[in-house]
Image: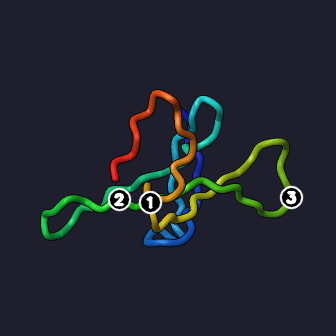
Amino acid sequence: MKSEDTPFEGGPMDGRVLPVLLGMTGHPPKTYKIPVPDPAGGSPAVLVYRRVPRHEGRPVGLRNRWKYRYDPQGDQGGSGLRWPWSKPHAG
């Protein structure tokens, strides 16, 4: 599988660049979730990053470049598409 070095912006991962696997369309996933273990042994926290377009210099061909921006609200923020067969959100 192909991967692409993708920068992270904001939150604890700010300024880091990680290789992210690309999907069949050649794009990285729309959300990137990073589980962070709790030092006290509780349930792990999850950092959520959302894919946004990255603009740097001149565009190269028709290929979009991406970066991940920290979403402090995580999964509680806009849920995106809702399919008719999806379960309703609890709460």
Earlier residue among tags 1 and 3: 3
SS category of the residue bearing label 3: loop
What percent of the width, then of the height, locates residue 68? 57, 58
What percent of the width, then of the height, locates residue 41? 13, 64
Left or right, 36 with respect to 2, comes to left
The residue depicted at 65 percent of the width and 56 percent of the height is: 52
Distance between the alpha carbons at the discs numbered 2 and 1? 8 Å
Query: Which residue in the protein does label 1 denote?
Result: 74
Q: Is residue 38 above or below residue 53?
A: below
Circle 2: residue type: Val
Label 1 vs label 3, nearer the camera: 1
Circle 1: residue type: Gly
Query: Which residue in the protein does label 3 denote?
Result: 58
Distance between the alpha carbons at the discs numbered 1 and 3? 32 Å
The residue depicted at 52 percent of the width and 65 percent of the height is: 70
What percent of the width, then of the height, locates residue 45? 30, 62
Circle 3: residue type: Arg
The residue depicted at 57 percent of the width and 39 percent of the height is: 22
What percent of the width, then of the height, locates residue 9? 57, 68
Q: Residues within 10 Å of mark 2 (few under 14, many from 20)?
A: some
Left or right, 60 with respect to 22, comes to right
SS category of the residue bearing label 2: strand
